[in-house]
Amino acid sequence: MKKHVLTRLWRREEGFTLLEMLIVLTIIGLLASLVAPRLFQQVGRAKEAAVKQQMANIALALEQYQLDNGEYPTTEQGLAALRTAPTIPPLATNWQGPYLAKNVPKDPWNHDYVYKSPGANNPGGFDLMSLGKDGQPGGDGENKDISY
């Protein structure tokens, strides 16, 4: 009987105390506050890289369209002319498309790309731009415009 009483006294109860739990949660919170901003910066950089790659692919398709038809699609025809032959003048007389394998993608913030031809910045060609996270002209950080 004595042996049973001694083992009960020396045996520690299983589980964590409230103080131990609070210390662990505090440490996790501090680590998260240090890591989260850097993680979100990486997400923003990845989206910017994706925009640049998508615009490069669209630009290649526009160049192929121009080689086949002698001019870029007009602003009114838009990027849709890369998937289906334009039905508004000037008609593409030698349309060999589709020039993109899939529909024209939206930017990583789910906004349409802005296309103008002739371009304001490139009068002999086209302007292609993403308006960034806010979808509005101008801005800083993730809201800045990205042009091709």
Image: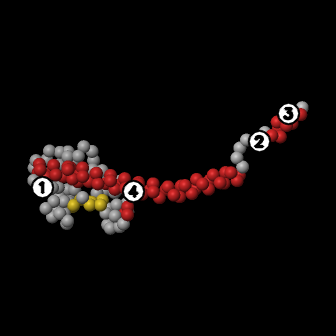
Q: Is residue 145 above or below residue 7?
A: below
What kind of residue is marked 1? Glu
Alpha carbon separation for disc pair 4 and 2: 49 Å
Residue 36 in the image: state x and y as whole percent. 49, 56
Please tell me which of labels 4 and 2 falls first in the chain. Answer: 2
What is the secondary structure assignment of the residue under circle 4? helix
Residue at 38% in and 61% down: 142
From the viewer's perspective, tell me whether residue 105 is left or right of residue 119.
right
- What residue is disc 3 on? 4
Mark 2 or 1 closer to N-term? 2
Q: Which residue is mark 4?
A: 44
The quarter of the picture where residue 44 lies is bottom left
Instruction: Tell me which amino acid carries mark 4.
Output: Gly
> Which callout, 4 or 3, points to the residue nearer the camera?
3
Q: Which residue is mark 2?
A: 12
Q: Position of residue 109 (x, y in %)?
A: 37, 56
As measured in the structure, the alpha-carbon distance from the residue carrying label 1 to the one carrying label 3 is 94 Å
Query: Three-letter amino acid code at disc 2?
Result: Arg
Query: What distance separates the C-alpha of mark 2 from that of mark 1?
Result: 82 Å
- For residue 71, which numbered disc appears in the image? 1
Contact check, label 1 and label 3, Cβ < 8 Å: no
Three-letter code, disc 3: His
Residue located farthest toward the right when viewing the structure as drawn:
1
The image quarter containing residue 129 is bottom left
Colour pattern: secondary structure
SS category of the residue bearing label 1: loop
Number of the front mark, 1 or 3: 3
